[in-house]
Amino acid sequence: MTWLFPSIVATLVGTLILAIAYFYLYYLDRKPYLFIWAISWCIYAVRFVFMLMVVANISPDLKPGFLILNQLAVLVSGVFLLWGTYTFISEKLPPYLIYLSAFFSIWIIAAGLSGRTLISATLPIYIFLGGVYILTGIKFLKNRQVQGGGSRYIVGYAFIVWGIHKADYPFVRPVEWLAPWGYLLGASLEIIVAIGMILIYFQLARAELKKSKENLKISEERLRAIFRTIPDPVLVYDNNRFVSDINPQFTKVFGWTLDEIKGRPMPFVPDDQKAVTENIYRKLYESDNPVQFETRRLSKHGELLDLIISAAIMVDASGERSGMVVNLTDITGKKRLEAKLQDSQKMEAIGVLSGGVAHDFNNLLGIILGNTELALDDVPSGHQARLHLEEIQTASLRAKDVIKQLLSFSRKTEHRKKPVNIQPVIKEALQLMRASLPASIEIRTRITENVSIVLADLTQIHQVLINLCTNAAHAMEENGGVLEIQLGRFRVTAESAKKMVDFSPGEYVRLSVRDTGTGISPDIRDKVFDPYFTTKGVGKGTGIGLAVVKNIVKTHQGVIEMDSQEGQGTAVTIYLPLILSEAVEEPVKRKDVPGGNEKILFVDDEEPILNMAKRTLEQLGYYVEIQNNPLDALSLFQNVPQSFDLVITDMTMPGMDGSRFVTEIRTIRPSIPIILCTGFSEKMDEQKAESIGADRYIEKPFERLDIAMAIRNVLDDISKIN
């Protein structure tokens, strides 16, 4: 059997190559069944080593041992092949096969040591091995993991044929002429099975790869869908900070499409944000920790947006940086709401402050107005000083109305509008402005008489013109210039109304205030009507003048426009709708001031007001007792309650307010007439005054005629009752 030695060597080398191939595949893929199959082929290769020792007649005394080891290697390798196959098909090796393997291993050793004949020693073992190989083949044939191709059929049937061949080994091996062919068939089947198993592995790997690609595609589509539907703008950079992708919301918010910016740096960082942004991104790249910061960015159309930016480094499957993803949350609307809330809080603060200011200011105006009226009594008609005093009187009354407007602006109260001609109030406002403007500013007017009737509050119209003229004067305070006021009619047709924002067809009064001052830059032109926005220095402006104007025009259903050029001046024009109605004339106040001879107790914590009131009322014939402390006044009244015909008291006083004072007076003498007056109090109005027992309620500053009429009416009403 000279042919046997080289055949065994060749088969040994081939089997070792197969084992190495399986170990390499396991190294790449780490599948457990590959490792088990590799071990199986290693053990099968050891079988041929022992066969070589037997054929080469090395150590004849050890030949029985080599034969035993040869047969054990065949048995164990077969069981490992079956174990690997069960692992491949995700099944557990049945325990009975392990027990049978152990039994036949003992049989091999016992038969070899007892010197049994070849057939009796090997027949049970090779029948078992044949069964193992046939079972392995059946498992491959039933396996559905591999779809398509014939590799599982080749391997399955090859294992079955190999199993049958294993079972005939005890009969073929002793026949000298048949043994080489049997060996050749076994070696061939070994190669077919080994290569077929590798083909099955690759076919399965290809199927898994295909499935992985499909899953990857599905995953990418899902991620792309998520990316497209993220409500915030998202921007993806590559490692060079060039744009690689954006989501649709980015285009919606910022205006750029992907084609416009892909492969380029993003051109939307304002100059004042570049250094801060670079510093934050530098820290991001140094630490790899996500960052979040508030900033501003420009849209394609130049709109400045407030944003919260969240940025993170992206890494690929190998752990290398692949770029940066940036989420941009638009908080512009939130910022505007916060600004409005702050404005609202400012307005609330102004409301509280203006109440206190109104009280003090009205008291001062009361002193000015009362003393002016007293002075007018001492100045003959036609005297120049009388004209000045009358202007002071008019200005004081306007100041009273302005205080009301300040309170109404901060508290959003309703105004009483009526059909009026506005020419007189325009002329009056201009007369006041002429006295306050420097000589370097020339006033020009073009006022159309009888432009028709508007539904308006004249005090508010007066305030509009004063504010506009004051702003215009401030714009020309350095170099002087021309202040031009125009008043006329303006018609909007149905056709032109379609092209004009905020206008409805009809007739309007157009009031225009134009200056030749510094003008307004385009970037702040839209902000000049915002509350508290001002370009003036500290102490020169509050930022509410134009806001007041806009608010008044809006409440009059009017339209306001501004046209300004830097270095050329500004024109502000307001349009008020005309109405078909007769003007309601202001009632002419009676010139005769009624007096009397009754005794009045006048209580106020302001000494100048007490002195002015005492002189005024005494000129009207009344006897006046004044008190600047409500507690002292109450004590005085309690001692001689029948000595007084009328009590006049202020509302806001230290020690005891007016409402409590009225209650205490009523307790002492329920029938005494009482007039309650105040510069300003949120706690008091006409209805509340009546509810606590006051007969009349008057707001300061009051004219002599107003207080005289109130006193006379109250006293006369009491007389009628009595």
Image (spheres, rainbow, N blue to C red):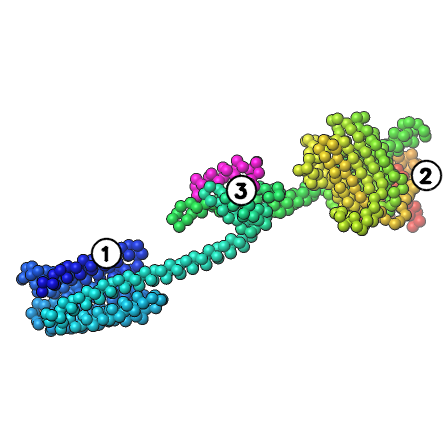
**Which quarter of the figure has residue 446?**
top right
**Which quarter of the figure has residue 346?**
top right
Q: Which residue is mark 2?
A: 592
Residue 323 at what x, y percent from top left? 45, 45
Identity, as a three-letter code, of the amino acid under mark 1 = Ile
Residue 661's place in the image compared with 50, above or below, is: above
Whether residue 655 sits left or right of residue 160 in the image: it is right
**Which quarter of the figure has residue 11?**
bottom left
Residue 606's place in the image compared with 327, above or below, is: above
User: Can you tell which mark lies on residue 671?
Assistant: none
Task: Tell me, yes or no, whether the highlighted magenta stretch contains residue 100.
Answer: no
Identity, as a three-letter code, of the amino acid under mark 2 = Asp
Residue 165 at what x, y percent from top left? 19, 71
Q: Which residue is mark 1?
A: 20
User: Can you tell which mark lies on residue 266?
Assistant: 3
Q: Earlier in the sequence, mark 1 or mark 2?
A: 1
Measure the alpha-carbon separation of dots 3 and 1: 55 Å
Q: Please name the residue shown 49% across and 37% down the image.
A: 279
Dot 1: element: helix
Q: Earlier in the sequence, mark 2 or mark 3?
A: 3
Q: Does residue 702 appear in this view?
A: no
Q: Please name the residue shown 92% across and 46% down the image.
A: 716
Q: Please name the residue shown 79% across and 42% down the image.
A: 574
Categorize mark 1 by other alpha carbons within 10 Å: few (<14), some (14-19), many (20+).
some
Identity, as a three-letter code, of the amino acid under mark 3 = Met
Categorize mark 3 by other alpha carbons within 10 Å: few (<14), some (14-19), many (20+).
some
Whether residue 2 sits left or right of residue 187 in the image: it is left
Measure the alpha-carbon separation of dots 2 and 3: 80 Å
Q: Earlier in the sequence, mark 3 or mark 1?
A: 1
Magenta-tinted stretch: 266-289
Dot 3: element: loop
